[in-house]
Image (cartoon, rainbow, N blue to C red):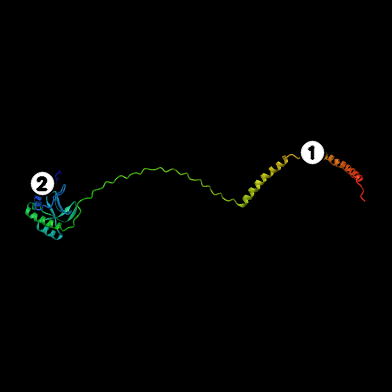
Amino acid sequence: MAKKPVFKAPPDKLALYEKVLEAFPEVELKGAANAYTAFNGNMFSFLLEDGRLALRFDEGELDEILAKYKAEPCRMYGRMMRGYAVLPDAQLKKVRSTTKLFERSFAYVKTLKAKPTTKKKAVAKKPPVKKALIQKPKVKKKAVAKPVAAKPVAVKMAAAKKSAAKVAPAKKAATKKAPAKKAAPKKAATKKAAPKKAATKKAAPKKAAAKKKAAKKAPVRR
């Protein structure tokens, strides 16, 4: 069961206020500390802490109520509440007269634009879901060869001369170290071949003698 609210207004004043509301079954008494009534989200009556009743009226009716019933403009928390008139303390005891005033206030508030009365429930925000961190394999960066600056022509020629100068002494040293070829054995070989020529000279007389013998034996042709 919901607990009955405890209002700040004196109990006897609250009882008179509730008696006036009995003539309006569609109007519900609201509030936690200060009793008030509202229609379509627009408040139009409430009890002050001292027990006086404040009613809301049209601007045209407000001046009349203030003058006729010796009411006062309503000021709450240092701010003027537009359209409200605070009735004298003795007025609430006059239930019939107060009911008529309440009816006029209620008729006025029905002409006002309805206001939303239900507050939107705060939706609890869900904590953000942390995505699982997937470790990507580290890709080794390929070593990029740095471009070699082109050397000037004069530098290239000087380098070529230096390399040629280093090669030249090596060739000379190689020629000095090589042993000289011996020509003596070849000459000895030619001397040994001399007897072959002598043998050919000796064979020549033999051929001449053979030719002479053949001539003697051959008959003379006539």
Q: Nearer the viewer, residue 26 or 6?
A: 26
Residue 139: x, y in percent? Answer: 46, 44
Residue 43: x, y in percent? Answer: 16, 53
Instruction: Return the residue at label 1.
Output: 185
- Name the amino acid, label 1: Pro
Q: Nearer the viewer, residue 138 or 41?
A: 138
The reply, left or right, for residue 58 in relation to residue 153 is left
Instruction: Return the residue at label 2.
Output: 11
Q: In the current view of this chain or complex, which residue is farthest to the bottom? A: 60
- Name the amino acid, label 2: Pro
Q: Secondary structure at mark 1?
A: helix
Image vertical order of residue 75 relative to residue 174, above or below: below
Which label's residue is closer to the chain start, 1 or 2?
2
Q: How many neighbours does mark 1 have within 10 angstroms: few (below 14), some (14-19), or many (20 or more)?
A: few
Q: Secondary structure at mark 2?
A: helix
Residue 113: x, y in percent? Answer: 18, 57
Q: How many neighbours does mark 2 have within 10 angstroms: few (below 14), some (14-19), or many (20 or more)?
A: few
The reply, left or right, for residue 75 in relation to residue 150 is left
